[in-house]
Image (cartoon, rainbow, N blue to C red):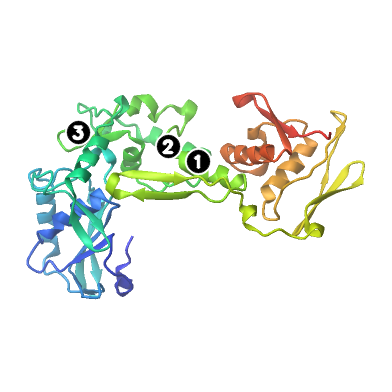
């Protein structure tokens, strides 16, 4: 969200546009709306002047309330714009040093709503945004958006006979609270209920341009036996797993022109970037007693008690554990005193989510320190026996 009290720090770019709007709503406003919606979203400021160096100065508006009314009247005219993706909260009036400025926050349109175009002209009225400003999309880019928005599943069908009052918002609150527990820190936590339902795919825009429930309400919304299913955690989990196994961070890039996102997963280890070190500094396991081993690295020394009387075995730990990776050391300590444990038990002990615990356990298993036994929810983990 833009801080208008620090407007001098901003410059116009691919997600920020300023217009004086001294004579009313500028015609270019709708081109910018289309451009932001079809790219990565952005903020439009009315009552602000842009200088040649792309810096800003507040000029103010004489009747901002009338401009807001004019905006919504035009916005709701399907002859002007093809898709209405704004909510009331996206348009507001703010005061800057006594002057009024209208702030319009345009979100990125979902794939199924693109292309967003103006003046009932699919090809001439479709825009996108780059650092230089708004530009017409090529016919190829428009056709690509059309191809992508046609990929709709049955649970995306809008139930036009129902309105949003069919939702039991108390149940929705329970759902969201449980999702916070199972997926802490999820990017949707701060969204308002309507936006959350849109992101989840539980509501969509009908032919009447109003929001209605979708078939996803029945298929997934309140499926509390598997709460949070399909809630956008796949990519974050990939990043966490890659980090947990010591690989270099994945790289995410997006090609706007062809409507594609790319995720590159490097198979090189973070440690591979380091130069070879002297043999005296390499990791070595030194036996100190029948039930202790010291794991030495160039930056860390850690003693692990490994006697397992219940199974009658002694475990030798040659752990590939960095000083900063305290979670894995905590897991090893826990497994030392527990013959076999599930990821849920480990998670409860560490006070983290089961998915995160599973990632750490996967990393230790890949390093040959921990053995995984069983399938799915019955899977248990134990320290690898010596020999």
Circles 1 and 2 in contact, beta carbons < 8 Å: yes
Tell me which residue sits at (14%, 64%) in the image: 64
Q: CA distance from mark 1 to mark 2?
A: 9 Å
Kindly identify which numbered label has been placed on residue 183: 1
Whether residue 331 is visible: yes
Q: Earlier in the sequence, mark 1 or mark 2?
A: 1
Query: Which SS class for mark 1?
Result: loop
Tell me which residue sits at (19%, 53%) in the image: 33
Q: Nearer the viewer, residue 383 or 75?
A: 383
Q: Is residue 299 left or right of residue 19?
A: right
Q: Is residue 118 left or right of residue 321?
A: left
Q: Nearer the viewer, residue 195 or 265?
A: 265
Q: Earlier in the sequence, mark 1 or mark 3?
A: 1
Q: Residues within 10 Å of mark 2 (few under 14, many from 20)?
A: some
Quadrant for the N terminus in the image = bottom left
Query: Which SS class for mark 2?
Result: loop
Where residue 207 sits in the image (x, y, percent)? 16, 33
Whether residue 93 is visible: no
Q: Which residue is mark 3?
A: 206
Q: Which residue is mark 2?
A: 231
Q: Nearer the viewer, residue 99 or 52?
A: 52
Q: Is residue 27 above or below residue 110?
A: below
Q: CA distance from mark 1 to mark 3?
A: 30 Å
Image quarter of residue 6? bottom left
């Amino acid at each position: 969200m833009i801080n208008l009290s620090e407007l001098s720090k901003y410059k116009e770019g691919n997600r920020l546009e300023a217009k004086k709007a001294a004579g009313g709503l500028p015609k270019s406003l709708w081109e910018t709306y289309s451009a932001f919606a079809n790219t990565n979203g952005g903020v439009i400021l009315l009552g602000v002047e842009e200088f040649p160096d792309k810096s800003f100065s507040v000029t103010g508006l004489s009747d901002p309330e009338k401009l807001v009314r004019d905006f919504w009247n035009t916005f709701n005219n399907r002859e002007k714009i093809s898709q209405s993706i704004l909510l009331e909260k996206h348009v507001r009036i703010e005061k800057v040093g006594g002057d009024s400025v209208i702030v319009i926050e345009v979100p990125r349109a979902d794939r199924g709503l693109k292309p967003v175009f103006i003046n009932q002209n699919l090809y001439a009225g479709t825009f996108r945004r780059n650092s230089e400003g708004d530009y017409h999309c090529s016919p190829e880019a428009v056709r690509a958006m059309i191809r992508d928005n046609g990929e709709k599943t049955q649970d995306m069908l809008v139930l036009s006979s129902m309105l949003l009052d069919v939702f039991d918002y108390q149940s929705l609150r329970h759902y969201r609270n449980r999702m916070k527990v199972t997926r802490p820190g999820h990017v949707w936590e701060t969204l308002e209920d309507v936006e959350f339902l849109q992101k989840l795919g539980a509501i969509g825009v009908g032919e009447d341009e109003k929001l209605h429930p979708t078939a996803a309400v029945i298929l997934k919304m309140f499926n509390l036996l598997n709460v949070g299913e399909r809630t956008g955690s796949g990519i974050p989990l990939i990043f966490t797993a890659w980090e947990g196994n010591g690989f270099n961070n994945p790289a995410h890039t997006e090609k706007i022109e062809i409507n594609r996102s790319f995720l590159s997963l490097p198979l090189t280890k973070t440690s591979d970037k380091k130069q070879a070190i002297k043999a005296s500094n390499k990791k070595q396991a030194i036996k100190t007693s029948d039930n202790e081993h010291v794991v030495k690295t160039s930056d860390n020394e850690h003693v692990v008690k490994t006697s397992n009387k219940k199974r009658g075995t002694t475990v030798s730990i040659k752990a590939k554990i960095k000083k900063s990776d305290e979670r894995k050391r905590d897991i090893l300590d826990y497994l030392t005193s527990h013959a076999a444990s599930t990821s849920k038990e480990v998670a409860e002990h560490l006070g983290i989510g089961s998915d995160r615990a599973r990632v750490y356990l996967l990393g230790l298993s890949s390093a040959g320190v921990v053995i995984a036994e069983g399938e799915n929810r019955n899977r248990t983990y134990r320290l690898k026996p010596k020999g």
